[in-house]
Amino acid sequence: MDISIASMLFYIFSGLLCISALQVILAKNPVHAVLFLILCFAASSALFIIQGAEFLGLMLILVYVGAVMVLFLFVVMMLDIKHMLAIKRTALQYMFLLFTIGGILIAQIIYILFKSNLATPSHLSSLHNVNVLSSNIESGINYTNQISNTKALGKLIFTEYLFAFEIVGFILLVAIIIAVTLTLRTRKDNKAIDVSSQININAKDRVILVDSKISKISKISNTPNITTSH
Amino acid sequence: MEIQALHYIILSAILFGIGLIGIFINRKNLIVLLMAIELLLLSVNINFVTFSSYSNNLHGQVFVFFILTVAAAEAAIGLALLVILFRKTRKIEADDLTILKG
């Protein structure tokens, strides 16, 4: 057997990735689809780690499986699953047609890839000698072999891509605000106080001094009784 | 047999095709539609990482980082939209989105 461990792992995880991706789009129950999507991300993070991109592989598990897919799962479980099961699927004959067209599409891409010079393995390794934007690309090359992937990526992000990194953080902030404001609704029995209306109130609007016997008595005793009307 | 960049790119093409078929099959179910879009983005990420690692150039991995964050933001906003759609119509079918007549 001349199959190395790395290539064996590649075939295992890529097979897992393809099968679970098919299950994502074919599963009737959306909860199953989300769970298979988690399996997809786990398999592809393994593929990233095989390729030497450890940081991205770990981030895919931490951020995607840990946060985004859990969000998906929450929303799917919050919505009415029984109703979603009743959504009519595409008819079987169209499904066959779709898979034929999709297969043709994939076959075309693979054919073009084989015709291109990517199929010759020496091409990619000599890619970094062809400098398109020479100074910009070379800065990323020398990192890879000497220090760890995470450190190199951090150096690149916090120096060259600092501005883009800040913009990405801002995009996440915008996403938080949009998601909160879209889904926020105040309940009718909510007893929270509207701060601005409370600040803008005058004492005259709030307090009415009523002349009554009790108030007269209290005036004598020098403690005005205040009747509030809300 | 040595695994080359071509293997990964073919895998990414297959994954992209599956995601595309998923969009057409589940065009009525909005939530599976979002999941198919996640599959498409994942295949693009695999392409980026492959080219980055086989050409010894880290810039591609930085872009995978950016794509991941934008995809997370997109998923959050899409799911929030789905939630308010479900509150309004009690359904999440794409065919029911006929409020805007145009």
Image (cartoon, coloured by chain):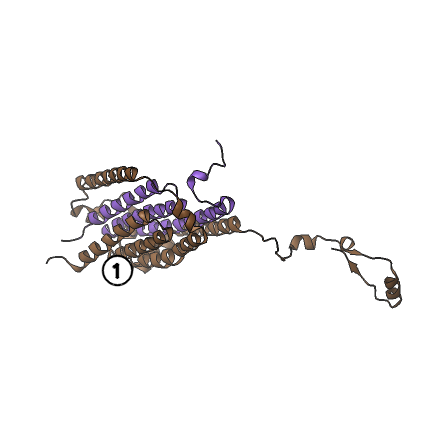
Q: Position of residue B59 (x, y in %)?
A: 31, 50
Answer with left or right where residue A179 lies relative to residue A92.
Answer: right
Q: Is residue A55 above or below residue B102?
A: below
Q: Where is residue A54 in the image (x, y as percent from the top left)?
A: 29, 59
Q: Which residue sits at x=25%, y=54%?
A: A16
Answer with left or right where residue B42 lies relative to residue B9.
Answer: right
Q: Quick one: which chain is purple? A: B
Q: Looking at the image, can residue A111 be seen?
A: yes
Q: Which residue sits at x=44%, y=52%?
A: A75
| The one of B79 and A117 positioned closer to us in this rendering | B79
Quarter of the rendering containing residue A150: bottom left
Pinpoint the chain carrying mark 1.
A
| The one of A122 and A137 positioned closer to us in this rendering | A122
Q: Position of residue B91 (x, y in %)?
A: 46, 45
Q: Is residue B36 above or below residue A45?
A: above
Packing grade of label 1 (10 A; few <14, some 14-19, many >=20) is few
Answer with left or right where residue A207 lies relative to residue A141.
Answer: right
Residue found at the very far top of the displayed protein: B102
The colour applied to the residues of chain A in this rendering is brown
Q: Give the residue at mark 1.
A: A146
Q: Name the amino acid type tagged 1.
A: Gln
Q: Position of residue A85 (x, y in %)?
A: 39, 48
